[in-house]
Amino acid sequence: MSDRTRLHLPLLFALCLPLPCVAGQTGAAGDADAAKAPERIHIIGASVSGGFEDGPLFGASQQGDSVTLQQLLKRWCGSEVKVTTHAPMEMWNLFTDPKGIGEKEVDMALRRQPDLVLAVDFPFWFAYGYVRGDEREARKALLEVGLAYLSRFEVPVVIGDLPDMTGAATRMLNPRQIPSPEVLEELNARLAAFAAEREHVTLVPLAAIVKQMKVDGIALPLADGPLVTAPGAMLQEDRLHATRLGMAMLVHELQDALRERFPAGHALHDRRWTFEQFVEAAGAGGELDLLREAAAGK
């Protein structure tokens, strides 16, 4: 298998702070109350949403473990809202053809007639990947394709901004696929402008949180006090994709951005799970126990 065919979407984030909606927020409370409550959430994106698992097949020394975004979100939504997703295996392969597969994801999502679209990692491969010619212009043009796809949605859409994935295992992400810092800053500015121009688009600031994760580690918000983990502790061996615990943290922090899209009085508007509840939903209890033991042994 070539280096290129072994590439998959990196983990965009393992979060450690509540995610404010930095652009495209809903208006006054009265507007939210008058809005129709979402009845179907549909997920599009790449391999973080698809629950990619690293392992020997991709050059890792041991098998990784994760969980899909749909599995966790279904648990959080309960019977209140239907949660559907694009096929996980195809999301894993978005990197191979972001234009073709991305368009297919949007086409299929529109056929599902969702009331809310969760596209947290959808923009990633419209910024990363191999490009020809001038890097700045090529990446900017590719991002515009992805934004044009997202513009087809008239319902609320939640997207994430672009992290700096420098330091990922080269077997999964070649350095030439990573935008330069200057270009990455420009692309994130374009994403922010896109969301600011559209009230129905919510942009969550994942890039800053990834930076903190990689440098400082993550403080898990446990009921008995925060547990500070080592940098990358909730990443699989490829230093890109989330473990089950990382996915639990992700959805724990995404819940506020989702709650805001439900009118006051709706069950999901008021639903705020603890981190431990997401750990249980992700089947990540054993992973958390190991981190506790490691911290206690210091």
Image (tube, grey):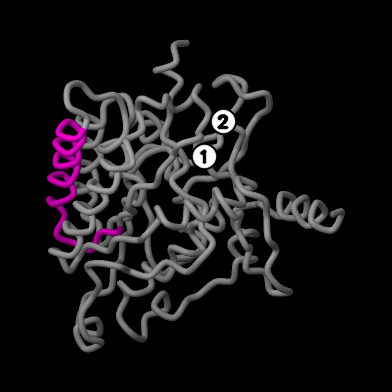
Dominant SS type (magenta) = helix
* Residue reaching furthest to the front: 182
Is 147 positioned to the left or the right of 214 in the image?
A: left
Q: Which residue is mark 1?
A: 241
| Image quadrant in which the C terminus is located | bottom right
**Residue 79 in the image: above or below residue 244:** below
* Residue reaching furthest to the top: 1
Which residue does the image show at 31% across and 44% down from the upper left?
Answer: 122
Q: Which residue is mark 2?
A: 54
Is 27 positioned to the left or the right of 14 in the image?
A: left
Q: Residue 74's spot in the image, x, y percent?
A: 47, 58
Disc 1 and disc 2: Cα gap in Å?
A: 8 Å
**Residue 254 in the image: above or below residue 181:** below
The kind of residue on which mark 2 rests is Asp
Give the class, few, some or many, for how many residues have Cα within 10 Å of label 2's Cα (few <14, many ≥20).
many
Which residue does the image show at 67% across and 50% down from the upper left?
Answer: 230
User: Which one is nearer the viewer's eye here, 119 or 233?
Assistant: 233
| Cβ atoms at labels 1 and 2 below 8 Å apart | yes
Taking the magenta stretch, the answer to whether it contains residue 264 is no
Taking the magenta stretch, the answer to whether it contains residue 143 is yes
Is 74 positioned to the left or the right of 120 in the image?
A: right
Q: Residue 199's spot in the image, x, y percent?
A: 17, 69
Which residue does the image show at 67% across and 55% down from the upper left?
Answer: 229
The kind of residue on which mark 1 rests is His
Magenta segment: 136-158
Earlier along the polypeptide chain: callout 1 or callout 2?
A: 2
Residue at disc 1, secondary structure? loop
Examine the image and state in which quarter residue 30 appears. Answer: bottom left
